[in-house]
Image (cartoon, rainbow, N blue to C red):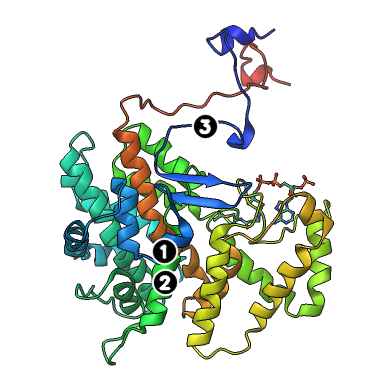
Amino acid sequence: VIDIAKLYGQTGMFTYDPGFTSTASCESQITYIDGDEGVLLYRGYPIEQLAESDFLETCYLLLYGELPTAAQKADFDYRVTRHTMVHEQMSRFFHGFRRDAHPMSVLVASVGALSAFYHDSTDISDPQQRMIASIRMIAKIPTLAAMAYKYSIGQPFVYPKNDLDYASNFLRMCFSVPCEEYKVNPILSRAIDRIFILHADHEQNASTSTVRLAGSSGANPFACIAAGIACLWGPAHGGANEAALKMLGEIGSVDRIPEFINRAKDKNDPFRLMGFGHRVYKNYDPRAKIMQRTCHEVLGELGIKDDPLLDIAVELERIALQDEYFVERKLYPNIDFYSGITLRALGFPTSMFTVLFALARTVGWIGQWKEMIEDPSQRIGRPRQLYTGATQRDYVPIARRK
Ligand code: ACO
């Protein structure tokens, strides 16, 4: 007989909450979501308004709590651009991977390896080191992401160019080649900057909670961000845009949509509409609306008049939003529904989609990690369990076991 009170070392209330659907793990002042109303605020500012700002301004806001003055912004941009290079030894580290390695596995490993190259910013008790680690992470993640991409396609790494803005620099590191002049298209660069803003933070989602849990043990920030990237990779989280695009390709034509809708509703079929539904949003994901607009802008700029996948996506959304199954369960398109089409049009292969998400979310992870470290009530995260295994029994030597 198990004495529950003794087992849990307490006699008070013990909650069992699989998936943490109703358990707050921390206090935070960074991001607010009203899932019923479809509202997302970073430090109080609506995502719709911030989507018109620039990504580094949003980074500053997430990290420091206020929008920067012009002087603060210039100083922040300078500090970030100073750290865009990665240690030259990192390129050797990259060359150890197989060419066909998924860029996410390369990113997890290379971000984890940063602590081996920058041990002067791993002492989390030192505010100065914490600040440098934060800036380094935001500055270097585009360089590492672009290196992961270039390595996967067998092209030489492109060094950062610090007179470009954050998004343009990233596009250039991904798409320029030494033998040709590369001009960044400002409309596409603006689109990618906006995509970064939309993904910058989303309170205590699985990857952010992973970063906080890893950080609660005192692990260094680079290791914590690597843990967040690993968690983000799953198809139910950051891998959903890749899965959504794959699904649209599988559907193949508008007339096959009802077949896939029926599969999504069939409880004996594991198939789900990827890019649909959200743990918190029980209304339209506000980021999805901005993403849809950005998608049209990008396709328009690139002169892509008819994208069959976009046609399928628009029609799928229309049909699903009229279907009782989706209406009853409050399943709406999430940010991933249109982001795959947009990123593909921008020239990224599907294997890079989650990498781009990780790049943008890095500031959110860092901001949340910093907030946790600076919180005096912070303790190591240690969820409990509801033990359902065997009660105490005696060991039997193998020769006597039946
Ligand atoms: N297609 C079909 N049915 C769905 C879908 C979907 N995409 N999402 C949820 N449902 C159904 C479930 O089967 C369940 O039905 P039931 O009540 O009859 O059993 C009900 O809706 C509730 O679903 P849960 O899985 O309990 O919802 P949860 O909050 O745990 O999951 C999640 C949210 C993981 C996002 C889910 O909606 C899903 O798998 N969506 C597809 C993957 C996806 O797009 N992920 C991206 C999330 S956003 C992000 O990470 C940036």
Q: Residue at x 69, y 74 (%)?
A: 314
Q: Which residue has dot 3 on it?
A: 24
Instruction: Using the rendered view, name the quadrant where residue 175 is placed.
Output: bottom left
Q: Of 334 and 395, which appears nearest the observer? A: 334
Q: Are marks 3 and 1 in contact (CB under 8 Å)?
A: no
Q: Are marks 2 and 3 in contact (CB under 8 Å)?
A: no
Relative to 27, 341 lies left or right: right
The Cα atoms of the two marked residues, 2 and 3, are separated by: 32 Å
* Mark 2 residue type: Ile
Q: Of 179 and 316, which appears nearest the observer? A: 316
Q: Residue at x 75, y 49 (%)?
A: 329
Q: Which residue has dot 1 on it?
A: 196
Q: Is residue 1 above or below residue 24?
A: above
Relative to 324, 97 lies left or right: left
Label 2 crowd bin: few (<14), some (14–19), many (20+), radius 10 Å: many
* Mark 1 residue type: Phe
Q: Are marks 2 and 1 in contact (CB under 8 Å)?
A: yes
Relative to 364, 90 lies left or right: left
Relative to 88, 353 lies left or right: right
Q: Of 384 and 212, which appears nearest the observer? A: 212
**Which element carries disc 1, helix, strand or loop?**
helix
Q: Of 382 and 20, which appears nearest the observer? A: 20
* Mark 3 residue type: Ala
Q: Which residue has dot 2 on it?
A: 192
Residue 362 percent coordinates (x, y): 37, 54
Residue 312 percent coordinates (x, y): 70, 76
The Cα atoms of the two marked residues, 2 and 1, are separated by: 6 Å
Quadrant in which the C terminus is drawn: top right
Quadrant in which the N terminus is drawn: top right
**Which element carries disc 3, helix, strand or loop?**
loop
Residue 251 percent coordinates (x, y): 74, 74
